[in-house]
Amino acid sequence: MQLLKDRIVKDGKVRSGNVLKVDSFLNHQLDITLFGEIGKEFKRRFADQTVTKILTIEASGIGIACIAAQYFNVPVVFAKKNQTKNIAGDVYTSQVESYTHGRIYDIIVSKDFLKPEDKILLIDDFLANGAALIGLINLIKDAGATLVGAGIVIEKGFQDGGKLVRDSGVRVESLAIIDSMGTDTGIVFRD
């Protein structure tokens, strides 16, 4: 998606430790016009699939998932990283290690919102080591629902997550795949 790649080059900031800061448009301040184009592109790429729900993980995936859901005309469910009083009753839970925060989270979704008849599309902002996607996939398996694929805004192709998830049989559609990045070399995209 050239519009996204252009924005990453223009406003993204490469930091040490393989960190790409895109907080001015993707995950702190949100460019809703860009999100609209991202949502349209996910709808185009998954037009051959029946989707009944979009699943993401808090917090950065929520905005993207909500805009994309408009094009699929389905609800969004997001996995919470903390048990709250708002989640009562039975839950599905999985562990996820956050690459960005260097922590392990128990992610939680109420069993009220994931059912065996659901056809789930995963949406997230980044794919690096694959831990978040694998955690979400485990929730879908526990629910007995069907995973139709994963839509990723930015994939760090030089890390193992994309290969790991694809090798498990999951269809992954990434809008921008970065093959390399560095503070000196900039960002190199996969064609």
Image (cartoon, grey):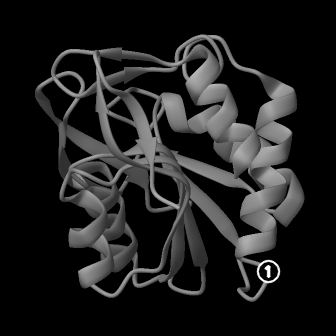
Looking at the image, residue 81 sits to the left or right of residue 190; the answer is left
Report x, y in % for residue 113.
56, 60
158 displayed left or right of 152 = left
Query: Residue at 70% of width from left, 19% of height from top?
Result: 30
- For residue 80, above or below residue 24: below
Q: Nearer the viewer, residue 178 or 22?
A: 178
Residues packed near mark 1 inside 10 Å, few (<14), some (14 to 19) or many (20 plus): few
Note whether 53 is above or below 20 in the view shown. below
Nearer to the camera, 190 or 64: 190
Disc 1: which residue: 47
Identified at 59% across, 87% down, the residue is 117
Q: Is residue 144 visible?
A: yes
Task: From the viewer's side, name the closer residue of 118 and 50.
Answer: 50
> Residue 165, located in which quarter of the rendered image?
bottom left
Instruction: Please state the horizontal and vertical placement of residue 9, each as a whole percent of the image.
Output: 57, 26
Indicate the amino acid at tag 1: Ala
**Is 126 or 188 nearer to us in this picture?**
188
* Position in image of residue 11 (x %, y %): 60, 15
Q: How many marks?
A: 1
* SS under mark 1: loop
**Looking at the rendering, which quadrant does residue 168 occupy?**
bottom left
Q: Tell me what residue is drawn at x 72 percent, y 73 percent.
A: 45
Q: Is residue 6 left or right of residue 154?
A: right
Q: Residue 90: percent from the left, percent from the top?
A: 35, 57
User: Does the rendering let one see residue 79?
Assistant: no
